Amino acid sequence: MGDTATKEALEWALGCTDAVRACAEVTRFMNDLASFKVQITCPRLSPILFIL
């Protein structure tokens, strides 16, 4: 299925540490917002989310 990364792609990703970190921070922030939204709309599900 083409799921393997080439050596060039890995070297490029390792060379762009600022971009990778920024992407990770944005993704984490979006995940936190989604979790908060679930806790607000369905408070009874909050304990279940912490187990996962």
Image: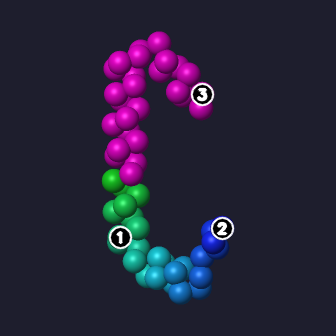
- Please say if 23 is above or below 48: below
The location of residue 22, given as percent across then percent down, is 34, 63
Q: Residues within 10 Å of mark 1 (few under 14, many from 20)?
A: few
Tell me, yes or no, whether the highlighted magenta stretch contains residue 36. Answer: yes
Classify the position of the N terminus by image quarter.
bottom right
- Closer mark to the observer between disc 2 and disc 1: 2
Few, some or many residues within 10 Å of mark 3 (<14, 14–19, 20+): few
Residue type at numbered disc 1:
Ala
Q: Residue at x 60, y 76 (%)?
A: 5
From the image, tell me which residue sits under label 3: 51
Q: Main secondary structure of the magenta part?
A: helix
- Looking at the rendering, the stretch of residues picked out in magenta corresponds to 27-52
The amino acid type found where label 2 is placed reads Met
Instruction: Name the element at disc 3.
Output: helix
Q: Which residue is mark 2?
A: 1
- Residue at the outermost bottom position: 8
Q: CA distance from mark 1 to mark 3?
A: 31 Å
Of the residues under marks 2 and 1, which one precedes in the sequence? 2
Q: Which residue is mark 1?
A: 19
Q: Is residue 36 above or below residue 27?
A: above
Image point 47% across, 21% down: which residue?
A: 46
Q: Position of residue 47 (x, y in %)?
A: 52, 20
Q: Amino acid at mark 3?
A: Ile
